[in-house]
Image: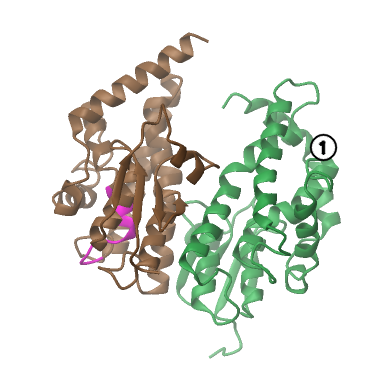
Chain colours: A brown, B green
Amino acid sequence: MAGGELKLLGTWASPFAMRVKLALNFKGLSYDNIEEDLRNKSDLLISSNPVHKKVPVLIHNGKPICESRIIVEYIDEAFVGTGPSLLPADLYERAIARFWAAYIDNKLLASWFQTFTGKTEEEKAEAVKQTLAAAEHMEAAFKECSKGKPFFGGNSVGYVDVTLGSLVALVRTSETYDFKPFDATRSPLLNAWLERFAALDAVKTVVPDTDRLVDYAKTRLAEAAAAVSNN
Amino acid sequence: MATDVPAVKLIGWYGSPYVHRAEVALRLKGVPYEFIRDDPINKSELLLQHNPIHKKVPVLLHGDRTICESLVILEYVDETFDGPPLLPVDPYERAMARFWAHFIDQKFARPFWMSFWMCEDDEHKEAFVKEAKGNLAILEEQLKGRRFFGGDAVGFLDVAACGLAHWLGVIEEVSGVTLVNGDEFPAFCKWAKAYVNDDTVKQSLPDRDELLAFFSGNKEIYMALARATLHK
């Protein structure tokens, strides 16, 4: 049922929480943004997502929905009359969008995270290779989905834009480590799309500050390394 | 012009639960299709051409459309063809069905695989068994006394969970490890039986004896793999 109370449990750094914020922004929906401390998770988070205990969680009229892509689809279906549709109307295009959204998480992001969490230099190097290969596929995906228009969703932002666009902060952070999967030479279309996407007001209000994210990433990586060496 | 050729084709490997997902969805919707049997050891040009990204089955060909990934195919079939809905109509219920399907795909593979194929005396085995059973308990709770996850009829989540209904028992028999028992998981056991005995589902389940032979034949490989991937 449209309307009603929307609460988002998330963190400023999480690209997954950012997907939900983007979807809500693009649909013009207001919500109560609750910043979680992942080291001291709230009772609300744990009771709302007992299976994974992770962010984001969207709570709509007291009912929790978990997993970022599932939340975005939910928002699109529950608020069908409000703002633009995120999933394509055409059923085949919709299937293609779902395919690429799953690919982004299962292949692109999985290997991208491995580039800095990999336990050996070999693992990291392999992860870089996989990420670049995945980026190449996403470049082709953009061509296929956009059909010459500015976004994956066509003239306006859609489901794949939100799913991939939430990585804009990750892209900027990676650049400080000299890793550019979407650089202008290798992925010109994606490079241009990312600039275009990041310039949208709805995006600017929820993108985490790059410097803050770089510091945060450094701290987390150092903690992880310390934990491993203390075992 | 060949008007009797079905407009829908499904490329699959015999014995794959992911292919079964796609087949049963088509059958539940009453969609005629041609099954193109591919060989995982010797993948066809047709498969590689239509799924160059993953090079896997199932692949649905609908006219000149190509759809890959079993859960994506399930939703496409549900939305495109008439017939009983596979996913619930209510957006919240849909989100829940998707969540649990995703849970099954993410959380069952590794702990189950390791529970089955690790050596009895490996100290890590117990932890995997605990994890696998913990996940099963969560799923057991989701049945909430219903015959199927979808209610009275087989639905999206039942189809997504098909591996647990039919393949799991086979692997338990081959490995000698029993995870699902009637005492700990009564609702789940009833569900599995109801699923494999459903008239429509039955038509696209691979033969149990053939599956037994297949998994038995590969037992040593699976055990070696389990040892090799322990620390990944």
Q: What amino acid type should be assigned to the residue bearing mark 1?
A: Val
Residue for badge 1: B177
Camera-nearest residue between A47 and B112:
A47
The residue that appears at 61% across and 60% down in the rendered structure is: B157
Q: Is residue B229 left or right of residue A192?
A: right
The residue that appears at 63% across and 42% down in the rendered structure is: B109
- Which stretch is magenta? A154-165
Give the image quarter of residue B29: bottom right
Please determine whether, in this image, residue B187 is positioned above or below residue A105.
Answer: below
Q: Residue furthest top?
A: A230
Q: Position of residue B8 (x, y in %)?
A: 56, 76
Camera-nearest residue between B76 and A180:
B76
Q: Is residue A164 visible?
A: no
Give the image quarter of residue A13: top left
Q: Position of residue B219 (x, y in %)?
A: 79, 37
The residue that appears at 61% across and 88% down in the rendered structure is: B4
Camera-nearest residue between A104 and A189:
A104
